[in-house]
Amino acid sequence: MSKKIFIITGETSGDKIASLIIKKLKEKNLSIQFLAIGGENIKSEKIDCIFDIKEIAYMGLIDVLKNLFSIKKKINLTVKKVLEFNPDVIFSIDSPDFSFRVLNKIKSINNKIKTIHLVAPQVWAWRENRKKILHKFIDHLLLLFPFESKYFESFIKYSFVGHPFFDFSIFKINKLEHKNNKYFTLCPGSRISELKNFMPIFIEVIKKINLNNNFIFHIPTSENNKNLIINYLQESKIENFIITTSEKEKNFYIQNSILTISKSGTITLDICKNQCPLIVVYKTSLLNYLLIKPFVKTKFGNILNIIARKEIIPELIQGKCNSDEIYKKAKEFIDNESLRKELVSEYTKILETIIVSDSLEKISNYVIE
């Protein structure tokens, strides 16, 4: 008998994870019908999407409020399409502010549809009270990291599955014998709002670095965002750049980069996998920052720093996320090879503690059980 699975993602990292799970499910040779909200990765698996993730990819509270009407329309459209599809399972990945609203509406209409959510909301960082209501619309919560379990005990059915990106079957720490260090990688994010936020800052950093160095700047992105990034660079008369859209190319250039500056997010785990020294940056609007700051409980934004309980990977957040501070920190690493090696060595120790043997298998089994 055919099984129906509706997949909800809201950003590039979730889209990538979903494509890995879909591949794993296909290996089982089961009769499965899929329908999804996805991006390039899910679409590459020949899965129909009711709309693209870029239509709901907003950053920060203010950005969400500005687009509230559009988001509500997408939530209602998703609920309508789910009910028409009548799946056995809804499998949602991250993007809690969108996913949870959809799941809550679905459960209030048809409680028989099973709901599984991967990537727990970061209640250990902020808004901890959310954990008390998750059981109302999530049947099974799948956790990426072991430390998360203590936050959900007695509140919801959960299982630790590990991070799919660190599944032993696909994960490999890429150590190069000889890096050429010709490249310098910049990762401004995948949302349009993130590109508008970080590209102007990164442009100024490039100009400062170009005064005394001869790097080729590498920016990994998606096909959807490629032209926007090229426009930023060309308008600023910057010519020494490479844009990549494939995983293979991205990995090559990151491995051969002297340093990467990246917006905080899942992409930083990819950078660590490719053994490149890394500086993490993050900035939102002042109003967003003032609204969110009182609720944030963790000192760090990067997951490896959170696990280590100390700042291994440098973080330049909000007021420090400007071209002067970023250039100053970058120059420390450009000029000091031993500092670069020490950083990679330290974060690799943490990285090796979160590699798991069968994350994809566990997740796919929970989805179809």
Image (cartoon, rainbow, N blue to C red):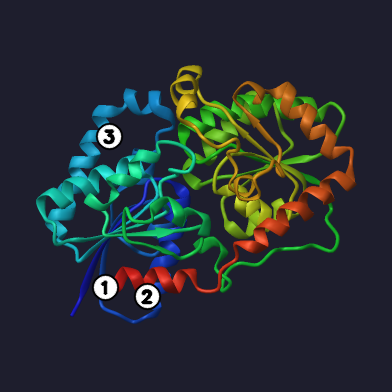
Q: Which residue is mark 3?
A: 71
Quadrant in which residue 56 is drawn: top left
Q: Amino acid at mark 1?
A: Ile
User: Compared to 210, does 35 lie above or below?
Assistant: below
Q: Are marks 3 and 2 in contact (CB under 8 Å)?
A: no
Image quadrant in which you'd find residue 265: top right
Nearest the camera: 124 or 69? 124
x, y percent for residue 275: 73, 55
The label on residue 32 is 1
Labels 3 and 2: the sequence-earlier one:
2
Circle 2 SS class: helix
**Residue 108 image offset from top left, x and y in percent:** 13, 48
Name the residue rendered at 78%, 34% in the picture.
330
Q: Where does residue 335 sit, x and y in percent of width and height?
A: 89, 37
Say left or right for 125 vs 61: right
Q: CA gap, disc 3 to disc 2?
A: 31 Å
- CB under 8 Å between discs 1 and 2: yes
Residue drawn at x 58%, y 71% is: 168
Name the quarter where the N terminus is drawn: bottom left
Looking at the rendering, in which quadrant would you find the C terminus?
A: bottom left
Left or right: 306, with 129 as reference point: right
Q: Is residue 181 visible?
A: no
- Where residue 26 sits, quadrant-wise, is bottom left
Amino acid type, residue under disc 3 in the picture:
Ile
Counting every numbered tag in the picture gives 3
Quote the CA–CA distance across marks 3 and 1. Answer: 29 Å
Residue that extends furthest to the front in the rendered view of this protein: 154
- Please, is residue 81 above or below residue 235 in the view? below
Give how far apart the Cα atoms at labels 1 and 2 are: 8 Å
Q: Residue at x 72, y 57 (%)?
A: 348
Task: Report x, y in % for residue 184.
Answer: 75, 42
